[in-house]
Amino acid sequence: NSKSTNPNPMKKILILALMLGAFSLNAADAPKPFPASLKNCVVSGDKIGGDMGKPYVFTYEGQEVKLCCKDCVKDFKKDPAKFMKVINEAAAKK
């Protein structure tokens, strides 16, 4: 009398597919691209990818944000609406 304790393999696949589907993103949920017209950091004004090295990239409320360096994040977080306004205006012009 040996009973199998493993669930049906198809059931495992279905559960995995449902779990993965729960974590998928719609195109509307994906970060919006950084406006190409912004070549300078919205916080410091320094050139992105210039003397500060590789830009610091993060997502703020669904919007991808690039700053010249990680140090600028502290100032960005003090008044994100101010900096997001600059980013959104640049995107609207494009």
Image (cartoon, grey):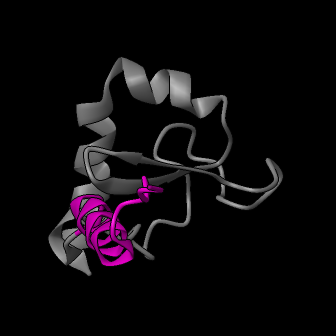
Residue 60, image x, y percentages: 34, 43
- In magenta segment, residue 66: no
Residue 53, image x, y percentages: 82, 53
3 and 54: which is toward the camera: 3
8 and 45: which is toward the camera: 8
Name the residue located 16 percent from the left edge and 70 percent from the top edge: 28
The quarter of the displayed image where residue 92 is located: bottom left
- In magenta segment, residue 9: yes
**How many numbered callouts?**
0
Residue 46, image x, y percentages: 65, 48
The quarter of the displayed image where residue 63 is located: bottom left
Position of the N terminus, as image quadrant, is bottom left
Magenta segment boundaries in residue numbering = 1-25
Looking at the image, residue 90 lies above or below residue 40: below
Name the residue located 23 percent from the left edge and 34 percent from the top edge: 81
Among all residues in the image, which is located at the extreme front?
A: 1
Name the residue located 55 percent from the left edge and 66 percent from the top edge: 39
Looking at the image, residue 51 lies above or below residue 70: below
Horizontal arrangement in the rendering, residue 6 relative to residue 8 (left or right): right
Horizontal arrangement in the rendering, residue 16 relative to residue 68 (left or right): left
Residue 44, image x, y percentages: 57, 38
35 and 9: which is toward the camera: 9
